[in-house]
Image (cartoon, helix red, strand yellow):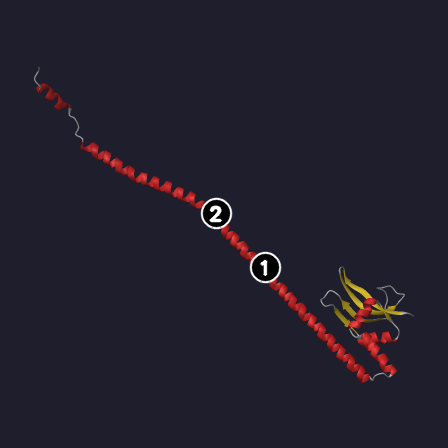
Amino acid sequence: MSVKIRLQRHGKKQKPFYWVVAADARSKRDGKYLEKIGTYNPNTNPATIELNLDSAVKWLHNGAQPTDTAKAILSYKGALLKHHLDGGIRKGALTQEQADAKLAAWLDAKAGKVDAKKEGLTKAQADAKTKALKAEKEVNAKRLASAAQAEADAIAAATPAVEEEVADVEEVEAAAEEAPVAEAATEAVTEETPATDDSSASEQAEQTPEA
């Protein structure tokens, strides 16, 4: 029986989640499998990979052939390196201790690279967030300045009309104040003028000698 190490799709639409499985090469992609040896989640950055290293190496020793994507995952997690080192141990090229030391050193270096990438991504996200916040503040400041300018322009445009209205009101009030003064003066003149008596006029006519 030919065995392949491949991915089996799970998850939901547009958000796939994969199992890394050892399966019969004749079975369907998402069909029966012999053993689940890990998971692969491409939705995170960097991608999240969990792998049972010993199980993966065991299937490689038994002749299982990984697909291209599965081979990249096995290489990323050190399964291919361990498989190679185990071959060297069987040939007597190195001891188990030497192989374990080389594998541990490689895993440490790999973990350092992954951590550095995560830190870089975190910093890039923080910088992008800071820039977005700064741009948003600038837009808000411009919006407030435009609103203040529009309000000032509206006030400036309304000021002449208000001044004219105030002037008209002042003129009306001044005229209203002058009217009682004129009326009082007219009444005073009327009171000082003596009234003509009809009887006095008649007496003067009688006393006037006839011509």
Residue 68 in picture, x, y percent from top left: 83, 67
Task: State the quadrant of the C terminus.
Answer: top left
Q: Position of residue 7 (x, y in %)?
A: 82, 66
Give the amino acid at mark 1.
Ala
Q: Which residue is mark 1?
A: 135
Q: Residue at x 18, y 33 (%)?
A: 192
Image check: 157 left or right of 108? Answer: left
Closer-to-camera residue (35/143): 143
Measuring 82% from the left and 84% from the top, which residue is drawn there? 96
Q: Residue 15: where, in percent of width, then height?
A: 75, 62
Residue to which mark 2 is pinned: 154
Q: Where residue 28 sits: x, y (%)? A: 87, 63
Q: What residue lies at 59% left-to-right and 59% top-to-bottom?
A: 135
| Local SS, label 2 | helix
Judging depth in this view, the residue of 110 and 205 nearest the camera is: 110
Circle 2 or circle 1, nearest the eye: 1
